[in-house]
Image (cartoon, coloured by chain):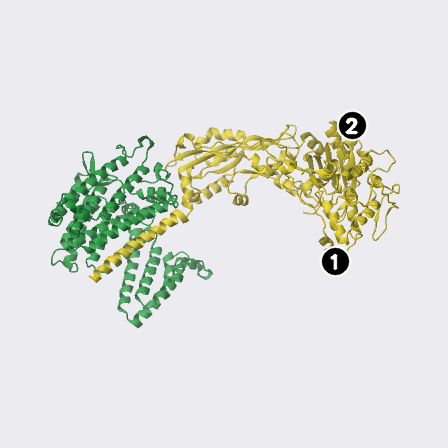
Chain colours: A green, B yellow
Amino acid sequence: MIAGQEYRKLDWSLVIAYLALTVIGWVNIFSAVYDQEHATIFDLSQRYGMQFIWMVTSYSIAFAILFLVNPKIYSTLSGFIYGFSLLLLAGVIFLGIEVNGSNSWFQIGPVRFQPAELSKIATTVALASLLSKYGFNLKSPRGIITTALVILTPVLLIIMQKETGSALVYSAFIFMLYREGLSGWYLAVGMLAIVLFLVTMGISSFAAVIVLTAIMTIVRGVTGKYPLRHFLFLLFFVPAMIYSPKLGELPFLEGIDDIHPTWWLAVVLMPALSYHFYKLFKAKMARMWHLTLVFFASLMLIFSVQFFFENVLQPHQKARIENLLGINVDLHGAGYNVHQSKIAIGSGGFMGKGFLKGTQTKFNFVPEQSTDFIFCTIGEEWGFAGSAMLISLYLFLIIKILNSAEKQKDNFNRIYGYSLASVIFMHFLINIGMTIGLMPVIGIPLPFVSYGGSSLWSFTIFLFIFIRLDLDRRK
Amino acid sequence: MAVELKKKNILIIGLLAVALVYLVQLFNLQILDQEYKITASNNAFRYDVQYPARGLVLDRNGEMLVANETSYDIMITPIEVKEFDTLDLCNIFGLEVEEVKAKLKEYRKNRRKIGYQSFPFVKQVPAQQYAHFHEKSWKFPGFTSISRTIRSYPFNAGGNLLGYITETDTAFLRRNPDYKMGDYIGRTGIEQSYEHILKGEKGYNIFLRDVHNQVKSSFSDGKYDKPAVPGKTIISSIDANLQQYGELLMQNKVGSLVAIEPSTGEILTLVSSPGIDVSKLAAINKHYKEISSDPYKPMFNRATMSPYPPGSVFKLVNALVALEEGLIEPGTSNSCYGGYFVGRGMGCHAHPSPVDLTESIMMSCNTYYAIVFRQIIDNPKYSSVREGFERWRELVMSFGFGQKLGSDLPSEQAGSMPSSQTYDKIHGKDRWRSLSILSLSIGQGEIGTTPLHLANLAATLANRGYYYTPHLIKGSPDTLINPQYTQRNYTLVDTSHFHKVIDGMFKAVNSPAGSGATARIAAVPGLDICGKTGTSQNPHGKDHSVFICFAPRDNPKIAVAAYIENAGFGATWAAPIASLLIEKYLNGEISREYLQEYVTNGNLMQNVPIKKQ
């Protein structure tokens, strides 16, 4: 319980950013599903009316967290909270109702509720409690395994609910772990693997090899003595790699035009690699051995992914995996959504078409426009200016949380803050990236903005626990 | 602590990098890339274009020259096309199966670019085929029909004047973004000059469609639909009956016949022979090859484009110049002994001598004009030949020669008018004398005038010193004409001199037999025609036959120029043709049937040398 005067010390900038985001969300949900017959934004038969209710209840929850709940309970009850959330996650697999092919929703009367949203907070609390325990060492094998178990148990349960998108969000914790002492190599190699995997599946192994070579060359340049040389080399080498299949059109090579284009890539790559090995043996640089190892491991990853995908899997299995990952370049399948989404955003221009004037997001060109694709409405009706504003607001929110977390004296609070910022960032990254065609379609909401009670409630709780924890430092 | 701070900053840098990449992508999508904006409007709305009826063209008496009739275009919306019986469709329209398949393949290849757009699939389908298609249209999803109006020509006259309409081509579209593929535009003639009045305004009905490409509804109950505004009717200055008669007179001859109402500058008749038959205009594409391979070039509007030496009719201009310069008076006489024998000299035909101004026009004496012209050029008033020539040129050009008159005929050309520089080039700087350019005295040499110029000269003479720019339409409240067309253009020759020349023109036509008058054949009792013949030498064969005239002498109603290629003396063909036209216009009927028969039966085509293609 906090005394009446202390509210002044709240981090009001976070509260205002939060309120701004919820109102922006509400207005754009109104625009996205606007119906002339239900013209008032408070009409409860429509999603905008419902979102208003979710907002009011969220504000009440926020108030309760700030003024009524003792913040000590989060660390003391962390085990109980985590256990309870696992129970809900497991329970929903059997007791939940099916929505869009996944069993992730409880229905209690008229209210639907997704435990996966709440379990992010429970996992955060559990991690914060675990990592801040005296004597815990993240770098020890025991520490790593415990941490991984805490994260992966809910992930497994969520995957069992066929909510892969939500499960993916848990990878955000790696940022927090990085701050807490995990080597940057995990982060870098992990991200490289994800990028190469996505490029291989999404475009081709050919493209993935080019991306890999480019990244490796940059790393080699930045860590060595001659970064500029490496950049100049890339400037010439990337086009050379892209156009390497044209070698097959050379008159004296005409006979061998039936091979996979990647072989032509190998022809171009070979001299560069030979030079690299020559240097490697001559200079005996330890770090370069690391790099070389990662390069060949990545090549193996690329080709095994491709081989597995193309030769081992049956077509329907492939489709299922593509579905699961949300990767589908067919314009009439999932790719259709992205294409329409890009059209909607692109048609916004600089200043946008204006409130309620978007043509693309109305009339159902863009699917899920009030939930996962809400950014389309913003892009179409408010243009580049509005989109940039929204992105800036998220940047402000995340950086503010990070800065504030770093200042915490209590480790629990710091870890909580980093987890919060990481999860918001992951949603931001995937959701906006997907609407502008830079990320695969993975159905997760835009925090505070997308339509939906579960999402808004849980992000409100997630954020306001941190604001409350932060208040103790400011007192 | 320091290390951990650094880690926070690395995370923030990563965050900022992601935000930057996203902003760049947004900038690219929303500002740089136009494709998404275009796709968006294709996506949501379906614009059904409503084509306006093109404006009509009437003649000066209300006769319908250009009208509209309905034809149908079969449209294809490639994205809506489902499997259908190709053979059946081909049978309806008489198409080749291979051709249709190739077209469909092309659409499939470009389907991303096409989106929801529609294209004409078969154009200008006759009503019967349309009815057949309409019955079965449910079998061909993605194919629709729209009605278009095409031109029809109820009155058979004026093929070269009216112009035709064709579909816009890509070069035109690039220059004129408000037109779309498949629109019609006027080419040549009135259709081109008055495109802005005739075309009307396209309208559209807007329908919304959703993601399943189903047309949902009329957008906002048609509040934003725009009805097509039909083009306005143009009243042409052409007299359709006279035009038709002129074309009859000119049949089987190569040349031009132009008639102008002097008091307004309105063109009554403009024939370029051989011309395009109006029956070929409606489907000009079908006939294009045939027309363009005709050695007599019917597309070429001789009346406005062909620069000819004017010949003796130009003596009128030289006489007026000399009068203006005070070098001669009506009483000024010169002797002619069958030619002018100074320098290279020039011949003349046999006629009584000496002649005064009136007689020089009436008998078309070359010698008289050789003398007068030298007086003009060697005028002691001016310090040099060059200055004398420049003064002559200035006066001549005030009649409109050597420049575009500014008519509304899009093909109008300037003709040619020599300058001092021209002669410097031929003879060397200032090494030319009045004798070197003596041909100009009788309208030969470096001067080139179009028949329209000559008709305008006739009108200027009729008006005694000014002309209205010749034009093809009459103004109406709907279609205001260019204000220039209602302004008098005075020549630099004082109006008091014109009657002296007109005396000669009157006598050239109306003198008794044996007087030596050159144009007696053009005389019609009671019409007081004033005229001047010309026989123009040219390097292409037999002389051109030229005649300009107006009538009646007082308060003239019509001015005519006739220019018949390779037809010999002016009096042989041009004068009869021009006088018949005048008689038809003023009297409504022809008293000289023998002359009409002689003209209409005359076939001079074989005289005209054909340039090898």
**Relative to A289, does residue B436 appear above or below in the rendering?**
above
Q: Label 1: which residue?
A: B428
Q: Which labelled disc corresponds to residue B591?
A: 2
Specify the quadrant of the image occupied by residue A362: top left
Three-letter amino acid code of the residue under disc 1: Gly
Q: Amino acid at mark 2?
A: Ser
Q: Is residue A96 left or right of residue B19?
A: left
Identify the residue shown where x is 84% and y is 37%.
B517
Residue B164 visible in the current orientation: yes
B87 above or below A475?
above
Judging depth in this view, the residue of A399 and A234 nearest the camera is A399
Q: Could you classify mark 2 by the number of other residues whose Cα lies within 10 Å: few (under 14), some (14-19), or many (20 or more)?
A: some
Instruction: Give x and y (percent) for residue A185.
Output: 24, 60
Task: Compare marks 1 and 2 and give the one earlier in the sequence.
Answer: 1
Q: Chain of mark 1?
A: B
Label total for image: 2
Subunit ID for the residue under disc 2: B
Crowdedness of circle 1 by 10 Å Cα count: few (<14), some, many (20+)? few
Judged left or right of residue B402, residue A354 is: left
Q: Answer yes or no: do the residues labelled 1 and 2 have beta carbons within 8 Å? A: no
Residue A201 in the image: above or below residue B605: below
Q: Secondary structure at mark 1?
A: loop
Q: Estimate the x, y position of residue B93 in percent, counting from the top left.
A: 52, 34
Residue B448 visible in the displayed image: no
- Residue furthest to the bottom in view is A282
Point out the frontmost of discs 1 and 2: 1
Query: Same chain for marks 1 and 2?
Result: yes
Which quadrant: the N terminus of chain A? top left
Q: Dot 2: what SS? A: loop
